[in-house]
Structures are given as structure tokens and as C-alpha cells.
Amino acid sequence: MTGHQPDEDDVIVLSGLTKLYEPTPRWMRIFARSHLTQPIKALDGIDLTVRAGEICAVVGPNGAGKTTLFRIIIGLTEATSGSGRVLGLDVTRESEQIRQVVGWMPSEDRSLLMRATIRENLQLHGRLQGMSPKELAARIPYVLETVNLAAQTDVVIASLSAGMKARVRLARALLPGPRALILDEPTGAVDPIAAHGLLNLIMDLVKQERLAVLISSHRLEEIEALQSKALLMDGGRIKYSGDLDSLRRQWDRPQLELVLATEADTRTVADGLRAQGLDVLVDGLELRCQLPGDQTIGAVLGGLGSAAASIQHIRETPMPLRDLIAHVYRLNPAAGGAA
Ligand SMILES: Nc1ncnc2c1ncn2[C@@H]1O[C@H](COP(=O)(O)OP(=O)(O)OP(=O)(O)O)[C@@H](O)[C@H]1O
């Protein structure tokens, strides 16, 4: 995502973006509901490029800096240093124009009026974004069709399921006809089946309209399904930036599952694997172990000698994304830096 010559398909381009939240001045602390006594570096030198038609998943533990990053891009928070551009517009000086070309889906429903209908909500938000009644009359049916809510146009928000509310928030983000979408935990309160539908919708939109998308999610299986690029963050810094396939190629340690016919065979093969330094889990007639990075299945089975003949079934499963990411997070920052 970084290290290439900029071109017109580069929609979001961030360079050395840093954000320091300053301590609350002493005199203000008694008035503030929460206050800072120490400065917090929420972002520390973030470089990122998201191109048209590309999804970049931003992953990181609580407090990693994901929301701060998103808020800077749409001009709700100002960076302390570094630069950010969206379609060539400066995130600090041209935030109003940026909001015309970027659809923002915040993580919470707080900005939806629960007693108003979907149409009324979209009209209100469209007007706040500077759209004319005529533009809205044309655009609202289109975005509701896109998110499969045309039949619910005049239904009040309070009576919708969490999945439908999420689709209303997506419809609102699509109102201005954006070139980029920023989605902060879009599936947070949504059940897995509705979440799957929402992500498919987002993937279709990316293909059809060549949108550049930044999305955060704590559900790693979703990130995997998006087949996106990934920005792994921790403490405001980048731990990994690149596509998930490269991450796998670099760090995947497949899990080996073996099925034996008898308990005696299971013990022999388990001993043979342990003799090669592998951690083996025995479950009945099944054995599981992680392949070391420098060994192939062939070499491990070869090391078992004649005992390998008693293996009934072999399966190699990829490392779950959760473990893969945990592995990258355990590495020192220098080793896990931007790819
Ligand atoms: N308005 C603010 N004032 C002071 N500190 C803040 C503010 N917003 C965020 N922070 C701090 O900045 C750091 C990054 O927070 P941020 O909300 O960007 O992380 P996040 O990755 O989105 O976390 P989460 O997954 O919990 O939403 C945290 O230490 C947080 O406490």
C-alpha cells in the first residue's frame, strides 16, 4: 500500500500521520466529564494508501487508534503532524469538500432519529450534508434500493432490526455518491447472518462503483471474508500493512492433523513427533501439532520412519487469522513493520 508512485487511483493517501491528545488544562479538569493528565499518542507516523476499488481492513485492539485515524480523514479530528489527502483534498483544510466525496459510517446509531422514518432520516442527513431536496428525491430511492431497504422506506427506525439499522447507516453514507467509504465497526451490533449480508453488499459496491473502503472490525473472520488489505495497528503504530495473503505466506504455520487406527499407533506417532521437537496434542486417535516454520509436512512425516505407515488420514489446516495476527503482534515493531 505504500512505496509506489502516486497515481489517480490513489484515493486516500496518508503520510506520517501523528495525533497527540494533549492533557486537559488544570483549570478545565473540574468541568470536564473525563480528562487527560498525560498526553496520549493515539497515532504515530501512519503511512497508508487506499486505491479505488480496494478495501483496507484496519485491525487492532481497543485504543489502537482506528477511530482517531478515521476521524482525521473525515475532518472531525485534526492531526498533530503528517499529511492526509483524499482525492487530492487536504484533510485539515478541505474537510467540508472531503465529506462530499467520503461516506462515513460511525460505529453507533446515536445520530439516527428513532421515531422518524428511514426516508425522513435520510432527508435530514442529506440536508445537513448540503444536498438539495431535488437531489435527495432522486438519490434516496437509489440508495435504499442498493441496501435492499426500498420496501421499508416509510418505516420508523425504532421498529427495524439491528441489521436493518446498520443498512440505513450504510445508505446514509452512500447519499452523497461517495468515491470512498469509511466504516467504523459496521457490523458491531449485528448478528452474524445479517453481518454477512452487509459485508457482501459492501463488497458488491466496491466492485460496481470502484469505491476505496477503510473498514474496522474486531471480527477477524469478517476481515478474512473481505479478502482485503490489512492495516494491523497497536498503540497508534503500524504492525503490518499489506495483503492478507502475503501475511500468510510470511507467517502461516499450518496445523497438522493426523488420525491413527489404534491407541498404540497414536502413542508411537506422538512420541515420534515430540522427538522432532513438536508440541503434540492427543485427542483419542487424533493428533494435532503446529508445523515449525522451517519444516515441511514431508520432512516431519519422513522423520517418523516406518511409524508413518500407520497414519490413516492427514489434514493440513491454515493457521486461524486470529493466531496469525497474534503472532505478528508478538514480534517486535521493527520486524512487523509496513510491508
Ligand atoms: N477525544 C479524545 N481525547 C483524549 N484521548 C482520546 C480521545 N479519543 C481517543 N483517545 C485516546 O486515543 C487512543 C486511541 O483511541 P481510538 O478510539 O482511536 O482507538 P480505537 O482503536 O478506535 O479503539 P476501540 O477499538 O476501542 O474503538 C486511546 O488511548 C484513547 O483513549
Image: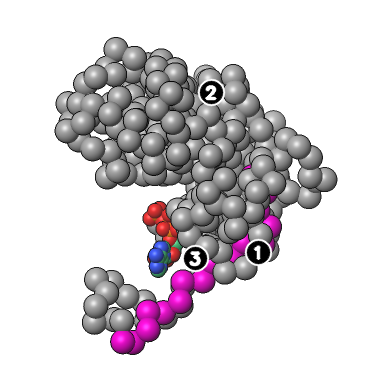
Identify which amino acid the numbered label 3 is placed on. Ala
Q: Relative to the observer, which residue lies in front, 116 or 318?
A: 116
Furthest-bottom residue in this view: 26
- Say which mark, if any, is on residue 205: 2
Magenta stretch encompasses residue 25: yes
- Region of the chain picked out in magenta, as a range: 12-27
Tell me which corner region of the image, top left, top right, bottom left or bottom right, holds residue 302.
Answer: top right
Cβ of mark 2 under 8 A from ligand 1:
no
Identify which amino acid the numbered label 1 is placed on. Gly
Which circle's residue, 3 or 2, is located before the other in the chain? 3
Please tell me whether mark 3 or mark 2 is closer to you in this view. Answer: 2
Distance from disc 1 to disc 3, alpha carbons, whole Å, reads 13 Å
Q: What residue does disc 1 label? A: 82
Please tell me whether mark 1 or mark 3 is closer to you in this view. Answer: 1
Cβ of mark 3 under 8 A from ligand 1:
yes
Q: 42 above or below 54?
A: below
Q: Secondary structure at mark 3?
A: strand
- Say which mark, if any, is on residue 14: none
**Position of the N terminus by quadrant:** top right
Q: Residue at x 44, y 31 (%)?
A: 132
Which circle's residue, 1 or 3, is located before the other in the chain? 3
Distance from disc 1 to disc 2, alpha carbons, whole Å, reads 31 Å
Q: Residue at x 33, y 18 (%)?
A: 149
The overriding secondary structure of the stretch rendered in magenta is strand
